[in-house]
Amino acid sequence: MDIQYRIDEKNLGSFFIEKEGRQVAELDFEIKDNILNAYHTGVRPELEGQGIAGSLFDEMVKYARKNNYKVIPSCSYILAKFRRHPDDFTDIWHRNQDEPTGEACGIKPGK
């Protein structure tokens, strides 16, 4: 399965996978002021446990590094990955006093 990428004029984007014309996995984000807010990761139930979310995560990390973005891990899955290996992500992890808890996963910006 190939990971595709899209971003719109409002800097809302997604890494996603389609299977048979249907989107089956996504990692959604917003970019603002060189900060990538990764706010949702989802994989359809029939594909869970196959490492697909991890592949989307890896693609997001490569993209952030390539574009010199810091990442706010608003999604609980992404936050867990960052916390599991914090030294691997010090170059991209945007940390501050109001750091997200991951409880906002799935809530789109501006809502």
Image (spheres, grey):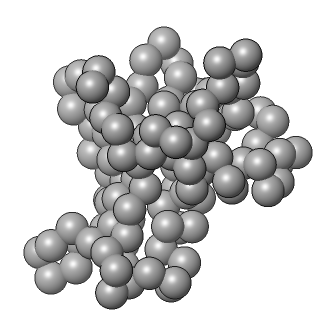
* Residue in front for this viewpoint, 80 or 90: 80
Q: From this viewpoint, which residue is outermost toward the right? A: 87
Locate residue 59 relative to residue 18 in the image: left or right.
Answer: right
Q: From this viewpoint, which residue is outermost toward the left? A: 21
Which residue is rendered at x = 43% and y = 17% of the image? 32
Q: Position of residue 52 (x, y in %)?
A: 47, 74
Q: Position of residue 30 (x, y in %)?
A: 38, 30
Locate residue 53 relative to residue 82 in the image: left or right.
Answer: left
Which residue is rendered at x = 52% and y = 42% of the image? 103
User: From the viewer's perspective, is residue 26 above or below residue 30?
Assistant: below
Q: From this viewpoint, which residue is outermost toward the top? A: 33
Q: Quadrant of the C terminus?
A: top left
Residue 42 in view of the camera: yes
User: From the viewer's perspective, is residue 10 above or below residue 23?
Assistant: above
Q: From this viewpoint, which residue is outermost toward the front? A: 103
- Quarter of the rendering containing residue 99: top right
Locate residue 10 relative to residue 99 in the image: left or right.
Answer: left
Q: Position of residue 4 (x, y in %)?
A: 32, 59
User: From the viewer's perspective, is residue 6 above or below residue 101?
Assistant: below
Which residue is rendered at x = 57% and y = 42% of the image? 102
Q: Position of residue 35 (x, y in %)?
A: 53, 23
